[in-house]
């Protein structure tokens, strides 16, 4: 294996690590967004109930 081949392997590994890290962050953010949407929905529902009574 020549030097350039080795270098690209390292770069690919780095790129993959960065990508998987980004994916993790995105997943977490997505989960967080879902949670806050759920909270917002229940909060709105409770507000509707309190307004009615």
Image (cartoon, helix red, strand yellow):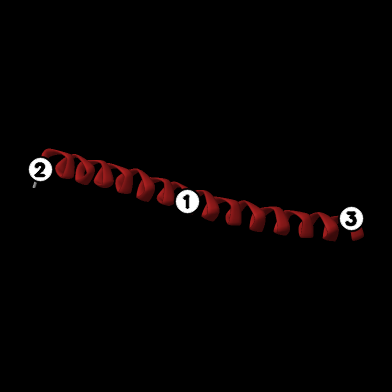
Give the residue displayed 26% in from the left and 41% down from the top.
11
User: Nearer the N terminus, badge 1 or badge 2?
Assistant: 2
Tag 2's secondary structure?
loop
Name the spot of residue 7 as percent of width and height, x first: 19, 39
Identify the residue at the far left of this view: 1
In space, the residues marked 1 and 2 are separated at their CA atoms by: 40 Å
Tag 1's secondary structure?
helix
In space, the residues marked 3 and 1 are separated at their CA atoms by: 34 Å
Res 44 label: none
Badge 3 crowding class, 10 Å Cα cut-off, few under 14, some 14 to 19, many 20 or more, is: few
Question: Residue 8's image quarter?
Answer: top left
Q: Is residue 23 left or right of residue 8?
A: right
User: Nearer the N terminus, badge 3 or badge 2?
Assistant: 2
Q: Which residue is mark 3?
A: 51
Identify which residue, 42 or 15, lies in the foreground.
Answer: 15
Name the spot of residue 18 as percent of width and height, x first: 35, 43
Give the residue displayed 42% in from the left and 51% down from the top.
23
Identify the residue at the far right of this view: 52
Mark 3 against mark 2, which lies toward the viewer?
Answer: 2
Name the spot of residue 29 as percent of width and height, x first: 52, 48
Q: Which residue is mark 1?
A: 28
Name the spot of residue 33 as percent of width and height, x first: 59, 51
Q: Are marks 1 and 2 in contact (CB under 8 Å)?
A: no
Q: Is residue 39 left or right of residue 17?
A: right
| Res 53 seen here | no
Q: Which residue is mark 2?
A: 2
User: Nearer the N terminus, badge 3 or badge 1?
Assistant: 1
Give the residue displayed 70% in from the left and 53% down from the top.
40
């Amino acid at each position: 294996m020549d030097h350039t081949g080795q270098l690209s392997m390292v770069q690919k590994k780095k790129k993959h690590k960065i990508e998987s890290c980004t994916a993790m962050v995105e997943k977490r953010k997505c989960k967080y967004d879902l949670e806050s949407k759920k909270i917002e929905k229940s909060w709105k529902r409770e507000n509707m109930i309190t307004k009615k009574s």
